[in-house]
Amino acid sequence: MAAALTDPLQRYLEHARVQRRLAARTLSLYRDALQRLQDLAEQDGVALLQLQQAQARRWVARLHGQGLSPRSLALELSAWRGLYRWLGGERLVSHNPIDGLRAPKAAKPLPKALGVDAAVQLAEHADAQQDPRLEARDACIVELLYGCGLRVGELVGLDAQASRAARGWVDAAGGEIQVLGKGEKRRSLPLGRAAALALQVWLTQRPTLARPEEPALFVGRRGGRLSADQIRQMLKARALAAGMPSHVHPHMLRHSFASHVLQSSGDLRAVQELLGHAHITTTQVYTKLDFQHLAKVYDAAHPRAKKKSPV
């Protein structure tokens, strides 16, 4: 059983409750953090009022090694830092040994991508009950998101024809799309066969929906430019209708595009150019997705990867 908190730590918690008005949940987390601090000090024979930053850093590393997550360590350091700030105000310490200490950076979650079969299933889904014009539009949207790796904002900004005012446009005859990406950087993307065919079908239907003089490539029932939210809602409903096992959003199709191109080509620099990333480090996350894919194939297919059943 852990020893009760010493007087200075108890007084600091009372200060946090009364003066800082911390919520009960936060106070409970702070109490746990201070308990760990006290336990560490007792284990190493260190007086908390004489704590030095090097020792505090070693404790952070120890807790991390014991499985405390970066997020939990950040809260831990917040509690410790507040304690020593208060101790300084009470003239019990001459410096704050926690100032300058930072928790390890949390690993960024890998982007979610559809498998090749699932992406093709979504792209080939057709709703026979929907207005043929809207069906042609929605099919084209899916093909451009997955076939070209567009951001939803880039897709929304596409016009049906090139103009001085256009942020992006399609060149159906040339088999290209011009988009204006992040940082106002323009890039040209090739249209694959499926995307070009879907675009051709939609362009024959678009005049029956678009308002006169509306430049947008993709328009809604009232003839105006579709918004990003409308595209997200459409894609969510279409994915459900296609039997997708999880929520699908536009950026997931961009991730799927990048992952599948990299799996097929292994050309990270080309994927960077297609996605419009300013730095190759941003694109390198897809090498991890590619490795996950290879690992799954290995686990499923290689006889030495399969676990032996217990005798």
Image: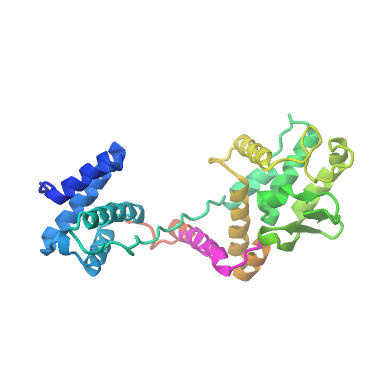
Point out the stretch of residues depicted in magenta: 276-295
Q: Nearer the viewer, residue 52 or 182?
A: 52
Going by the image, does 113 lie left or right of 33?
right
- Residue 237 in the figure: left or right of residue 303: right
- The residue nearer to you, when weighing 154 against 119, is 154
- Residue positioned 81% across, 59% down in the render: 175
Q: Would residue 173 be seen by someone viewing this image from the given angle?
A: yes
Q: Which colour assignment does the render follow? A: rainbow
Q: Is residue 305 above or below residue 242?
A: below
| Membership of 155 in magenta stretch | no
Residue at x-position 75% and y-position 52% = 194
Count of residue discs: 0
Question: In the rendered image, which quarter is residue 281 located in?
Answer: bottom right
Quarter occupied by residue 256: bottom right
Residue 265, percent from left and from top? 62, 67
Q: Position of residue 267 (x, y in %)?
A: 62, 69
- The answer to whether residue 191 of the structure is visible from this angle is no
Pick the residue in front: 267 or 69.
Answer: 69
Residue at x 32% of width, y 51% of height: 75
Residue at the location (13% across, 62% down)? 47
Residue 91: % across, % down: 19, 58
Q: What is the chief secondary structure element of the magenta stretch?
A: helix
Residue 294 within the magenta-colored segment of the rendering: yes
| Residue 74 percent location from the top left of the image | 34, 55
Residue 45 vs 133, above or below: the answer is below
Outermost residue toward the top in this view: 129
